[in-house]
Amino acid sequence: MDQAPEQQPRIEGVKYRKVRLYRSVTTEIDGIPSTRLEPYRGWEPVPPREWDELILRGVTGIAVSFTAIAVIGGTASLGGLLDPLVPAVIAYGMGSVFAIAWMYCLGIEWLNRTAPDRARPAKVAGWFFLLLSMGAVAAYGHTLNQPWAGGFGACVDLVAKGSWWLLLREYAVPLDAGVAHWVDEQEQKLAGRALLAGRVRRLNRRAAYQRAVGGAEYQAAEAILGRAEAARQSLPQAAVEPTPDPAPAPVAAPAPVIPPVAPPAPPVAPAPPVAPATQSPVVPPVVSAAAVPVTPPANSGSSVPPVPPTNEQSNDEQQVPVPPVAEISRPAIAAICRKEIGDDVEVTDAALVAAVLAAGHPDKPALADTVRRTAQRVDPTRKTRKVS
């Protein structure tokens, strides 16, 4: 069996009191222990009396008693003032409103004792309701031809309100701006969680009630909404359009520079190869006339007619030789006129016609008129000159 714990030696100047303490006692039989708590008498130090706490409790009790007296006096005064107008029960009930109103504002001010900005509206409203209550008591004394009694009775409410004002100043602790902001954020988070939990709880209750009493209509509506939700989730996600880069500022393009075009030399037809006497003549390749139509190049002046496709489709298609056609590259009449006018603004139409003929264009009856109109389009200010 365990022995009682040794008592600590007493310290001189410290008060002790005798109390009932407990110790654990273990009993072991056949190797099986059993522990129980055994009470015993001991001494423990008594903490010093907290005078600040006692005084604070005392002034709080005094403020409560002042408030009770003020409420009773204000209710009696205003009830007596309103008794000739309404029944007595209603009159005295109305008389308690003013005192209860400034007490209500006092409670709001107590809840916001660490936030002066939030407590200020309640403080202002409390003093306003106090003035109304004091005015009611003073008016009741005036109706009884006791203005002094009414005035001193009205001061009871002022004393009660003043006692609570001083008590709130003792409890109020102004917070630093940073600490106040941190407290506001925490309160907002907690309030948001509480509000969301309440909404979810209400929705769950409503859903459970609808499932219980909704019947077939509720089940059909739930099935329709479930299919719509499943169809919406099965749709492919729309690709997010990339944000276009800001367009660069437009840069003025330089004026095009037209290089001078030299008239090409007239083409020289290659001489046909002379086959030796001992070799067989070269046979040109043949192609299907129906598969490859031959079209002469534009403005080539060649008199080679196109070979029309044959209408007979058989296993052995007609094979016709395709003569080689040399393409002739020459500048357009407008380019020639632009170049000549650029070199000499006073150039005559005859000189322009000669330059066109030198570039390889065929001599046609209407060539001079075509050159004249083209020159006027290139240079509208140009004076028309007759071709000599």
Image (cartoon, grey):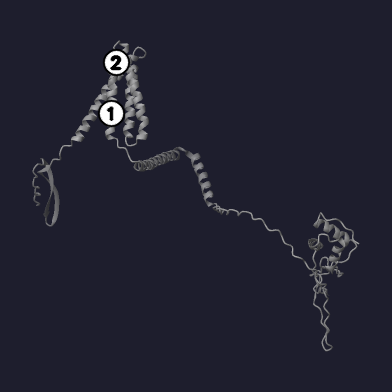
Q: Position of residue 313 (x, y in %)?
A: 81, 70
Say which amino acid is labelled 1: Trp
Q: Secondary structure at mark 1?
A: helix
Q: Secondary structure at mark 2?
A: helix
Give the distance between the C-alpha atoms of the residues marked 2 and 1, in whole angstroms: 22 Å
| Residue annotated with mark 2 | 150
| Residue annotated with mark 1 | 164
Crowdedness near tag 2: few (<14), some (14–19) or many (≥20) residues, C-alpha within 10 Å: many
Say which amino acid is labelled 2: Gly
Q: Position of residue 154 (x, y in %)?
A: 29, 19
Crowdedness near tag 1: few (<14), some (14–19) or many (≥20) residues, C-alpha within 10 Å: many
Q: Quadrant of residue 58?
A: top left
Number of marks drawn: 2
Q: Quadrant of residue 196?
A: top left
Sequence order check: which comes first, mark 2 or mark 1?
Answer: 2
Spot the residue most to the bottom.
278
The reply to whether residue 97 is in sight is no
Q: Horizontal placement of 367 versus 183: left or right?
A: right
Q: Horizontal placement of 252 versus 331: left or right?
A: left
> Measured along the vertical axis of the image, is residue 284 above or below residue 57?
below
In the rendered structure, find residue 386 and report the number of the disc placed on it.
none
